[in-house]
């Protein structure tokens, strides 16, 4: 757990900035968006110009978190402004591979970089790394950071942080939703958060196309090792047939875990760039972060991911082989 002194040091470093960026990994999920909004709010109490920058569009289910203050999309013109900033805060990743568009820019500038993250992969160069692998969400850490430094969180920031925590704990049903998580969530509720409204925004607003894609994916599941391991796949043909969009594929991997016999599983998705996205999940039997690292990815023991350069069939064979090797 991050100490109060470490949280204070992060704020002390940022107080000397006039212009700052807040960035997160490509394809930002709910925790990434929540943490980014939370950091932006905290920094704006002390820094004159704070810009949240994203490398991919915010998915529809999370748009309500940034509707009144959208982040800036990465572009060549934004890249050209890098020389004018005084510091960068990176949230929800410490892996250089997940920040490919900006890594070279940061390497070419002598800028202080502060990282808030709760993942195991930590190869990004930074001035200060606040890493807490026991934290259920990076949004949880940002809420603690603000509270430790008596920074008032307005309702918008509180909603974003609560949503980030909820997203990374599967609406508080995953094993990472511990006492610490509930205590912080309660303090955010005291600041005006209405959980039922956030739940409906996150989990009761699916498009019919997503459910059609989910049905096809579940219908094609392959089971191995006596039903303990499941492999799902989403092909470009399935996506086109269902009329699905990128946001419709969010969290599909989680649904495979509802099958009682399955203790570990993977969802493989064909991407437009020819690579295969690998989502890995476990109920604690296999350390999926270790499996993901063999593909150059990372994450948590129970939830990790990677990208694979090759065909879907090649990815399936390699993923299955490595998962079964850990099951033995």
Image (cartoon, grey):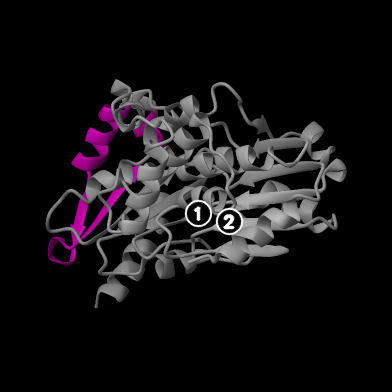
Left or right? Give the position of 108 relative to 218: right
Mark 2 touches mark 1? (CB < 8 Å): yes
Judging by the rendered image, the residue that carries numbered circle 2 is 116
Q: Is residue 160 visible?
A: yes
Q: Is residue 215 on the magenta stretch?
A: yes
Give above or below for 212 relative to 180: above
Q: Residues within 10 Å of mark 1 (few under 14, many from 20)?
A: many
Give above or below for 57 relative to 90: above
Q: Residue at the location (68% across, 39% down)?
A: 45
Q: Where is residue 216 in the image (x, y as percent from the top left)?
A: 24, 35
Q: In which quarter of the image is residue 22?
A: top right
For residue 141, which numbered disc appears in the image? 1
Left or right? Give the position of 199 relative to 1: left
- Magenta highlight range: 210-239
Mark pair 2, 1: CA separation: 7 Å
Q: Residue at the location (21% across, 53% down)?
A: 222
Q: Position of residue 50 (x, y in %)?
A: 72, 37
Q: Quadrant of residue 239?
A: top left
User: Residue lying farthest bottom?
Assistant: 328
Q: How crowded is mark 2: few (under 14 residues within 10 Å), some or many (20 or more)?
A: many
**What SS does tag 1 mark?**
helix
Q: Residue at the location (67% across, 37% down)?
A: 53
Residue in the foreground of this view, choosing between 302 and 208? 302
């Amino acid at each position: 757990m991050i100490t109060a002194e470490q949280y204070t040091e992060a704020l002390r470093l940022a107080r000397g900035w006039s212009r700052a960026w807040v960035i997160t990994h490509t394809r930002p999920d709910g925790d990434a968006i929540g943490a980014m909004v939370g950091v932006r709010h905290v920094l704006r109490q002390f820094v004159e110009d704070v810009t949240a920058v994203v490398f991919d569009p915010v998915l529809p289910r999370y748009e309500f978190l940034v509707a009144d203050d959208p982040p800036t999309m990465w572009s060549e013109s934004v890249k050209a402004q890098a020389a004018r900033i005084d510091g960068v805060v990176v949230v929800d990743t410490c892996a250089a591979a997940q920040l490919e568009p900006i890594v070279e820019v940061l390497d070419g500038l002598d800028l202080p970089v502060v990282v808030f993250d709760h993942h195991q992969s930590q190869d990004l160069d930074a001035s200060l790394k606040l890493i807490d692998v026991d934290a259920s969400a990076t949004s949880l850490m940002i809420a603690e950071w603000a509270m430790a430094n008596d920074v008032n969180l307005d309702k918008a920031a509180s909603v974003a942080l609560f949503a980030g925590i909820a997203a990374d704990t599967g609406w508080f049903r995953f094993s990472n939703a511990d006492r610490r998580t509930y205590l912080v969530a309660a303090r955010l509720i005291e600041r005006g958060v209405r959980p039922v409204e956030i739940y409906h925004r996150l989990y009761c607003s699916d498009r019919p196309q997503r459910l059609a894609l989910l049905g096809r994916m579940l219908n094609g599941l392959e089971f191995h090792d006596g039903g303990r391991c499941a492999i799902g796949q989403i092909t470009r043909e399935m996506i086109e047939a269902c009329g699905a969009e990128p946001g419709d594929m969010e969290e599909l991997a989680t649904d495979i875990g509802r099958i009682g016999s399955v203790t570990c599983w993977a969802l493989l998705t064909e991407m437009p760039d020819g690579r295969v996205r690998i989502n890995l999940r476990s109920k604690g039997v296999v350390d999926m972060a270790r499996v993901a690292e063999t593909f150059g990815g990372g994450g948590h023991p129970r939830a990790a991911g990677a990208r694979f350069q090759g065909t879907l069939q090649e990815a399936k064979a390699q993923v299955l082989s490595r998962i079964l090797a850990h099951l033995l």
